[in-house]
Amino acid sequence: AAVAGDGGGVAGIAGAAASWVLGNMGGPSTSVEETSTMLSVVTKDRERLGQRLAAETEARKRLEAEKRELERKLNMGSATSQVETRSHRQIAEALSRTKDEVGEKTRIMQNQTIEIANLQNTKTALERRILALEKKISQYDDSFYALEARNVRDKTRMEEMGKAKSRAEEEKNICRLMLEQAHERWLKERSDLRKDALQKIQTNAARVREQRMQIAELQQAHRAQRQLAEEAKMYKEQCTVLMEKLSRAGVGGGTTPAASPGGVPSPRARPGGAVAAPLKAPSAANLLEKMKSSVSSSGLLGRATSKESPRAPPPAPDAP
């Protein structure tokens, strides 16, 4: 609003100067000093307002850049915290599952250890019984029938021991097979965990690449904004050149030729005594209209470019 007010004030001052020049063109001749004084005042006001507009534009751009930087930092911080929270939760779940599996395997190993200890105890008991039987056989050597009976009995007992041993071997093989299967399951689960970790790393890398692409797009938009600011500066310079041309044209067209000193005839006087018609000075109003139309067309072009690129920041305000 302040910029628009400054622009309106400059336009009002320029219009007043133009109306004053046009009002005095048809009347009596005015002094060059008054005209130059008026135009210098207008030029100083225009320069002062232009400097004020440039300062306000620079401050607004700086504030917008700081705002964008803060928003980018906030978005990066929230995204980083979310990723870390998700990764920590997944790691905690994986650790809990691994602990449960390790506990189950530990219980299985303890049971198998108890069974092995029981088998060893039975084996020692059988060995003790064998020793006792051998002692009895040595005691019954005198009697053949007793020895035969004892031999038969020992044979049957040996067969039972062989069967028990074979059963123990089968149980041992079963336990070994169970251990091998558990080891294979553990290897498979470890490979699955590694695959999951690799997939998570790949997804994180893809997310980082997307964020880098977004940063590149923001940099491109910033360059486009800078180009628009340079175009606005060029339009301001064109307006300055047009105002200088207008001031020269106003000075040249507002003065009328004074009477020749010493009775010297005017160069416009005709030989017959008639005075030639004065040449038409360039119209100040026409020059003002041309300047305003050029400034408005440059402003419309800047707004059109800003509408076509929605991601870029708004362009700098047009020069008054």
Image (cartoon, rainbow, N blue to C red):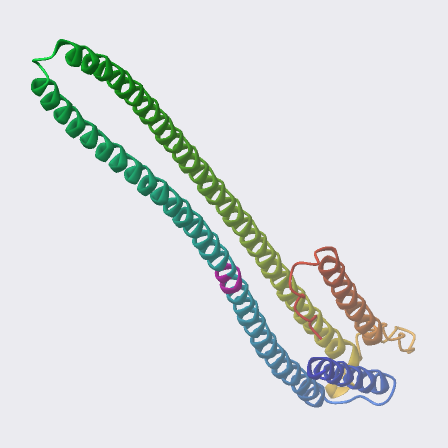
Q: Quadrant of the C terminus?
A: bottom right
Q: Is residue 150 left or right of residue 278?
A: left
Secondary structure mostly seen in magenta is: helix
Residue 260 rendering spot, x and y as whole percentages? 76, 84
Image position, residue 97 (x, y; %): 44, 48
Relative to 2, 67 lies left or right = left
What's the magenta region? 77-81
From the top left corner, tell me how far across and down residue 54 is, in percent.
Answer: 60, 75
The quarter of the picture where residue 296 lies is: bottom right
User: Residue 213, position in %: x, y?
Assistant: 55, 49
The answer to whether residue 182 is magenta is no
Residue 182, visible in the rendered structure = yes
Residue drawn where x is 53% and y is 48% of the image: 207
Q: Kindly identify the residue that appears in the image at 85 percent across and 86 percent down.
A: 23
Res 256 seen here: no
**Is residue 80 found inside the magenta-colored segment of the image?**
yes
72 shown above or below 189: below
Task: Work out whether residue 212 or residue 111 is closer to the camera in this orientation and state it.
Answer: 111
* Count of marks, rendered view: 0
| Residue nearest the observer in this picture, 155 or 92 | 155
Residue 28 quadrant = bottom right
| In this picture, residue 233 sits left or right of residue 245 | left
